[in-house]
Structures are given as structure tokens and as C-alpha cells.
């Protein structure tokens, strides 16, 4: 007979680690981008009990959290689940230390889900399978900035540890030694070379940034687009692509993020607008994304649920822009791709059941 704690079959419990704000919002149905009902639905269909936790209420032996059973939430203290899907952003030294302690007694997948972009680039560059998809990228320095201005017609200066397009600067060469610079939501400015260097250096201001060659992205209605590709481990522990959604930049913007005014568009529509065969191109994107995920998971074994930003250039070549360790998934909701949206929650639960069975 399986051990239980107040009616809960502990061996069937799957931990889902959330940020404190998201955790506290469960009973009020205010969980932001997290569609908790989909976790519940998937877990129930798979014969598992989801147990929602936050690091504040966890110690090295047990956790106080919300158990979803019989269509209701119950506050319980249970032993640390054997398998935990991490959806919390653990950036502080304290939270990282606690997460590492939990990982010693539990299989925590996607344990560290905020990754330094330059570190990820270096890991992938070492793999022949993934390096072909990487645009030229270097650590930011004033010297490397000057080199980029001598080498590239267009490039990005990006913070290595941010999300939703924050802090990104785009730089493009114009005639007569003038550079066009896009920063934040401001209109682009035109600056001489030395002014450009001083402006960018001032914005970076000793923070950790990188310089990345701009991909000549394919366009939709005169605006650049890229793809958000959800790549997840599933029921047999293997990588697969759960969904693909297009993100089109707002008019005059240099980033495609929906949080920065971008528009979600179905990828097939984007492919057709550029003359790409939608079936062939989607398959190529999926194959590239899986190769990248497999290469990355050799270096970071716990990684299992990511959102990749992938660009396609005018010739149809595929490029990795960045890897997001905590895919928000809401682009599928914008596109009414409800089955795909559900599957992005079901797939981690399938992987959790696979880990539990081992």
C-alpha cells in the first residue's frame, strides 16, 4: 500500500514550484500568465496529484502547499515530492541555495530557469549540432563594440540576463558614418560613430551585456518577425516541439516581444507570406529546435521545458536568437490555439510521470 498523508497518496504527488505571488493567487484565481487549471486537468487525467509550493514555505524535509484533489484545493504539509516542476524564478542567493538543497532529495526539472544568454551561447557554440544556428555573438566591451561597428551593418547590444525585450539596443549603419540607434520605446536617433559608442557605453554602464549580429529577419507586412518555439521533454523523457507561434514586431519597433507591442501571428501564415512551404519550414524549425535542446541538455541536465526565439532570414536559414528557461506560453492563448496551449502544460506533467515511474 502506498504511503499517504491525510488521504493523499504521496507517491503520486507532483510538486509544482511557483513564485510566491503566483502561489498566493491560486485561491483567488489570479495567477498571471500561469494557467493553473491546465496543470490540474493534466494531472488528474494522468492519475497524479498536483501540489503547489513556493520556496518560502519549504524546508529540506517538507513543504506547506496547496493540494488539488476532488476538484478542490486543500492546504497541507507534505514530504518534499519526489519530482518537482520548477516554474519559480530563483534569482536570489537565498532562493538558489534552497532550490539546490531540495534538488538533493528530489528530481527538480528546470531547476535553474534563468540562464545567462552569453553562457548559453558558449555552451551551444561548442556543439557541432547547434553551432550552425548561432549568429556571431561576443561579450560586450567598448573594444568589441568598435569591432562590431567596423564589421557589421546591423547588430544588437543585449543584457545577458533579462527577459521580454528589456534593455535591448539595436544599431544599424547609415551613409556618411552615421548610425541609427533604437533604445527602449523611444524613436530611433541618428548619431555619429563616437556619439553612438558613448551613448551605448552609457546605457550598458558596467552591466553584463553581449553584442550579437542582427539577423536579416523575414518580414510580415513590412515588420520583422521571429518564432517562439516551445520545446519540452514528454512522456518518454525525449525532447519534442509542443507548439510554434509567430511574433511580429510593432510598427517602428526592433523587438518582437508581445510585452513590447508585438503581435502574435500563426507561423503558417508567416511562412506563406514569404513564399516558404509551411509544412517543410515548420519541420525544419522543429528539427533545429530539438537539436539545440538536446545539445543544451548535455551541459544542463535538468533543463526540460524551454521557449526558444528562432528567426528565419530572407533566404530561409534558421537562427537561434535566445533560449528562455521559463516559457510564458501565452502566445498560444492570443492565437486561440487552445489545444496547443493545453499541451504546453500537459507535456511537463507527462515528463513528471515518466520521472516518477523511474
Image: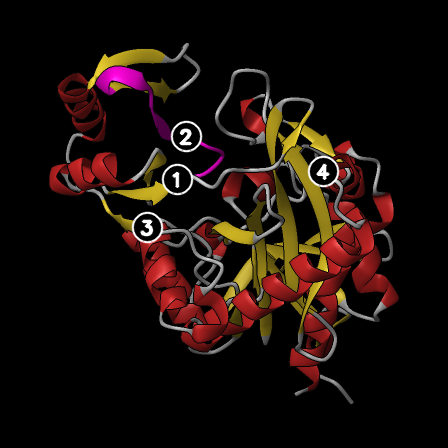
Task: First in sequence, mark 3 or 1: give its number.
Answer: 3
Residue at which label 4 appears:
274
Q: Secondary structure at mark 1?
A: loop
List x then y, in percent, for residue 343. Answer: 79, 56
Q: Alpha-carbon distance for marks 4 and 1?
A: 31 Å
Task: First in sequence, mark 4 or 1: give its number.
Answer: 1
Q: Secondary structure at mark 2?
A: loop
Residue at which label 2 appears:
166
Quadrant (top left/top right/bottom left/bottom right) for the N terminus: bottom right
List x then y, in percent, for residue 186. Answer: 40, 11
Image point (52%, 69%), residue name: 108
List x then y, in percent, for residue 246. Answer: 68, 39
Q: Is residue 65 left or right of residue 188?
A: right
Residue at which label 1 appears:
162
Question: Dot 1, crowdedness within 10 Å: few (<14), some or many (≥20)?
Answer: some
The answer to whether the residue labelled 1 contacts the one labelled 2, judged by CB atoms less than 8 Å apart, is: yes
Residue 322, relative to residue 69: is it above or below? Answer: above
Q: Secondary structure at mark 3?
A: strand
Residue 72 visible in the picture: no
Foreground: disc 2 or disc 3: 3
Q: Is residue 76 left or right of residue 297?
A: right
Residues rendered magenta in the picture: 163-177
144 or 158: nearer the viewer: 144
Task: First in sequence, mark 2 or 4: give its number.
Answer: 2
Could you say which quadrant of the image residue 172 lies in? top left
Foreground: disc 3 or disc 1: 3
Could you say which quadrant of the image residue 248 lies in? top right
Residue at which label 3 appears:
137
Amino acid at each position: 500500500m502506498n504511503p499517504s498523508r491525510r488521504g493523499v497518496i504521496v507517491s503520486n504527488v507532483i510538486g509544482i514550484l511557483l513564485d510566491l505571488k503566483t502561489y498566493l493567487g491560486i485561491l483567488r484565481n489570479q495567477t498571471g500568465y500561469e494557467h493553473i487549471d491546465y496543470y490540474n486537468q493534466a494531472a488528474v487525467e494522468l492519475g497524479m496529484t498536483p501540489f503547489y509550493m513556493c520556496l518560502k514555505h519549504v524546508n529540506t524535509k517538507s513543504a506547506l502547499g496547496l493540494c488539488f484533489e476532488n476538484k478542490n484545493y486543500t492546504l497541507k504539509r507534505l514530504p518534499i515530492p519526489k519530482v518537482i516542476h520548477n516554474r519559480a524564478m530563483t534569482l536570489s542567493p537565498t532562493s538558489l541555495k534552497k532550490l539546490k538543497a531540495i534538488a538533493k532529495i528530489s528530481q527538480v526539472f528546470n531547476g535553474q530557469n534563468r540562464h545567462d544568454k552569453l553562457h548559453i551561447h558558449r555552451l551551444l557554440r561548442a556543439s557541432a549540432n547547434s553551432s550552425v544556428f548561432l549568429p556571431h555573438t561576443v561579450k560586450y566591451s567598448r573594444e568589441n563594440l568598435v569591432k562590431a561597428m567596423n564589421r557589421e551593418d546591423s547588430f544588437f547590444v543585449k543584457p545577458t540576463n533579462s527577459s521580454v525585450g528589456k534593455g535591448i539596443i539595436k544599431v544599424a549603419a547609415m551613409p556618411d558614418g552615421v548610425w541609427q540607434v533604437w533604445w527602449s520605446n523611444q524613436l530611433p536617433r541618428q548619431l555619429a560613430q563616437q556619439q553612438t559608442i558613448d551613448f551605448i557605453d552609457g546605457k550598458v554602464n558596467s552591466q553584463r551585456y553581449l553584442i550579437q549580429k542582427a539577423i536579416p529577419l523575414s518580414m510580415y507586412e513590412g515588420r520583422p518577425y521571429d518564432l517562439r518555439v516551445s520545446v519540452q521533454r514528454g512522456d518518454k523523457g525525449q525532447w519534442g516541439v509542443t507548439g510554434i507561434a509567430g511574433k511580429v514586431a510593432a510598427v517602428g519597433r526592433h523587438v518582437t516581444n508581445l510585452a513590447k507591442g508585438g503581435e502574435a501571428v500563426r507561423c503558417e501564415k508567416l511562412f506563406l507570406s514569404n513564399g516558404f512551404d509551411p509544412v517543410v519550414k515548420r519541420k525544419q524549425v522543429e528539427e533545429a529546435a530539438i537539436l539545440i535542446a538536446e545539445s543544451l541538455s548535455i551541459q544542463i541536465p535538468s533543463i526540460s521545458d524551454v521557449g526558444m526565439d528562432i528567426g528565419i532570414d530572407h533566404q530561409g536559414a534558421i537562427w537561434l536568437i535566445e533560449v528562455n528557461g521559463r516559457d510564458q506560453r501565452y502566445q498560444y492563448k492570443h492565437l486561440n490555439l487552445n489545444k496547443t496551449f493545453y499541451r504546453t502544460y500537459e507535456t511537463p506533467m507527462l515528463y513528471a510521470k515518466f520521472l516518477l515511474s523511474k
